[in-house]
Image (cartoon, grey):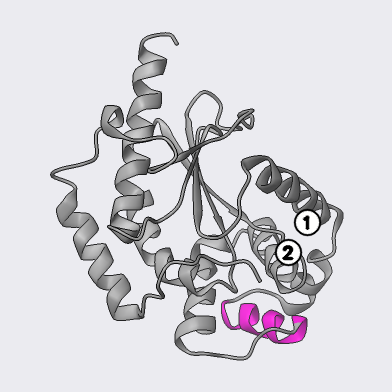
């Protein structure tokens, strides 16, 4: 099972990371001080974006990944603060096994229009409450608790729409060169993971700086 190799963070540590992120906003990383190979990896060739001229930021994640669970409330708050020219998207890693099952779960929730109210809730149930919901029936029961029709959920999870999304996610994640989660992709060009020094706040500072770089390039016509 592929996951980040950085130290594990507990819930309290994740909240501390969130606080640190908010306080660090006054001194963001500068794009011209970033070091390729250290702060980010260049994706070559770049992966085409789907953001209609806006700056695309993708988090590649997995519901079974404890690091993604710790990062979830942090990126949720960060997403809320993004300006109109930034589009933030979640793409589940389809590494096989339980990763594919949960990727299907994500796209089923998306197809049913319940992602906003279930995304962080599923992380919480799996990693904070430690609920055993790895089987499809159990997962469907969890979504039913959040107002989702269980039979519709089970029929959608193997639908053409979800199968197409799974195939697309597999291709995109391979193109990004993702080796662990969570990973952030900026504009299909840059791959960012949480560094050991600075953790998730630094990861999002780097992301902010790369977004600023893309914004400047667009403004300059490059």
x, y percent for residue 27: 15, 43
Question: Residue 30 lies in magenta, yes or no?
Answer: no
Q: Which residues are magenta?
A: 136-146
x, y percent for residue 139: 68, 81
x, y percent for residue 212: 33, 29
Figure check: 51 above or below 199 = above
| The image quarter in which residue 219 lies | top left
Helix, strand, or loop for circle 1? helix
Question: Residue 139 lies in magenta, yes or no?
Answer: yes
| Residue visible at 36% across and 51% down in the picture | 203
Residue lying at the far front in this picture: please name it: 37
| Residue visible at 49% across and 82% down in the picture | 127
x, y percent for residue 163: 82, 55
Q: Which mark is residue 104?
A: 2
Helix, strand, or loop for circle 2? helix
The N terminus - image quarter: bottom right
Camera-side residue: 207 or 2?
Answer: 2
Q: Which mark is residue 162?
A: 1
Compute the Cα span from label 2 to label 1. Answer: 6 Å
Q: Which mark is residue 69?
A: none
Camera-side residue: 171 or 32?
Answer: 32
| The image quarter in which residue 136 lies | bottom right
């Amino acid at each position: 099972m592929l996951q980040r190799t950085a130290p594990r963070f507990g819930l309290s540590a994740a909240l501390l990371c969130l606080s640190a992120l908010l306080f660090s906003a006054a001194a963001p990383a500068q794009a011209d001080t970033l070091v390729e190979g250290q702060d980010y990896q260049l994706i070559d060739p770049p992966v085409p974006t789907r953001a209609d001229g806006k700056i695309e930021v993708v988090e590649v994640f997995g519901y079974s990944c404890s690091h993604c669970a710790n990062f979830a409330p942090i990126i949720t708050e960060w997403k809320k603060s993004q300006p109109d020219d930034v589009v933030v998207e979640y793409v589940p890693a389809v590494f096989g096994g339980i990763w594919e099952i949960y990727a299907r779960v994500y796209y089923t929730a998306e197809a049913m229009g319940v992602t906003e109210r279930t995304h962080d809730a599923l992380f919480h149930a799996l990693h904070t409450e430690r609920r055993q919901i790895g089987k499809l029936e159990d997962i469907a029961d969890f979504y039913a608790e959040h107002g989702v029709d269980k039979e519709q959920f089970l029929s959608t999870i193997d639908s053409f729409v979800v199968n197409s999304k799974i195939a697309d996610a597999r291709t995109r994640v391979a193109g990004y060169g993702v080796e662990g989660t969570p990973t952030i992709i900026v504009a299909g060009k840059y791959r960012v993971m949480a560094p050991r020094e600075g953790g998730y706040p630094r990861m999002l500072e780097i992301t902010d700086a790369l977004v600023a770089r893309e914004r400047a390039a667009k403004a300059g016509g490059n």
